[in-house]
Image: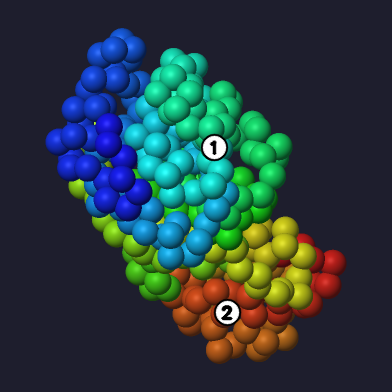
Amino acid sequence: MKSCVFSPPSRRVLLTRTLNILRTYNIKPRKKLSQNFVVDPNLIGEILARIKKCNYRKVLEIGGGIGTLTLFLSNAAEEVVTIEVDKKLVNVLEKEVASKRNNVKVIHGDILKIYKELGSFDVIISNIPYHISSKILFILTEMTFKEALLTFQKEFADRLLAKPGEANYGRLTVTANFYFDIEYLGMYPPASFYPPPKVYSTMVSLRRKTIHIDVPLKYFQDTIRKLFTLKNRTLKSALKNIVPADKYTPELVQKLEKYMTRRVRSLSMGELIEITSILYKHFEEGTV
Ligand code: SAH
């Protein structure tokens, strides 16, 4: 494949390469591992443009697949590490990419098990194995990087990007936005991949942010989890369910008065932080 740095070839060329590799190596894409390989030059171009614009040098790719993206990444960056769980695809990555590019390192492993050993990167890229979307999000909170460019199943990305009051706004939204600034980068149809998945995909950018809260993180997370299981109720009604009756005092009601008639799902990050802080101080020992 002719791999020009910032202008990937046409979809037809990408698809032909994909089909050739699958045939040559006798590979049947495994649904269980979300094996849908990118064949969309726009998706690849978006990632390469970002790498160039931000001058990223060290790249981690989660789920290298048959190396389509890996090849372009190796042109655009100084160092590329790609993790792949499927031994057969590791063989493809070694033969088709690593043997031709000395700046690519292929690691055979499950990202969920080895992420702590990987060190730091400028950018982490993944056409996310759909079955592990939330788990990947969680491990990213423990990894070191400047930006992650992730292509999620659209419905999952919609939840990350939801605004207070929208139907998709929930615990996942609040938790993810607590750790990251999340930006929408584009939507891609099933035909962007081979074999095509059943769903649309959305690319998002994640950048680490630091929110300061004056309660223990675990208390904040537990409270968010409890509140959002009752997200369609008013705060008042939700609290009645999660605060022991003897602790649901007039003082507590007064402290939270301005929020009591609001639906949980309409509360913004800032409001939730304030509410959690009031609850924590009210109970001091920190049990809702
Ligand atoms: N990035 C490639 C491949 C995407 S398909 C492309 O865009 O073409 C997703 C890839 O992730 C598959 O190759 C699958 O085998 C791999 N994968 C799935 N679960 C994984 C895990 N837990 N750790 C590492 N790789 C995984």
The answer to whether mark 1 is within 8 Å of ligand 1 is no
Which element carries disc 1, helix, strand or loop?
A: loop
Seen in the picture, residue 258 relative to 154 is either above or below; the reply is: below
> Residue at the location (49% across, 71% down)?
264
Q: Residues within 10 Å of mark 2 (few under 14, many from 20)?
A: few
Q: Is residue 217 left or right of residue 188?
A: right
Which amino acid lies under the numbered mark 1 shown in the image of this protein? Asn
Q: Determine whether, in the image, residue 108 is placed left or right of residue 17.
A: right
- Residue of label 1: 103
According to the picture, the residue beneath numbered tag 2 turns out to be: 270
Ligand 1 within 8 Å of the CB at mark 2: no
Examine the rendered structure and indicate whether residue 87 appears above or below residue 223: above
User: In the displayed structure, would residue 218 be above or below residue 77?
Assistant: below
In what element is the residue under mark 2? helix
Residue at 46% of width from left, 17% of height from top?
Answer: 91
For the point 43% across and 60% down, which residue is it? 52
Quadrant of the rendered image containing residue 51: bottom left
Q: Nearer the viewer, residue 236 or 145?
A: 145
Quadrant placement of the C terminus: bottom right
Alpha-carbon span between mark 2 and mark 1: 43 Å
Are the residues tagged 2 and 1 within 8 Å (C-beta)?
no
Residue furthest to the left? 12
- Which x, y percent locates residue 129? 42, 36
- Say whether residue 117 is left or right of residue 76: right
Q: Nearer the viewer, residue 127 or 17?
A: 17
Asked if residue 162 shows in the view, the reply is yes
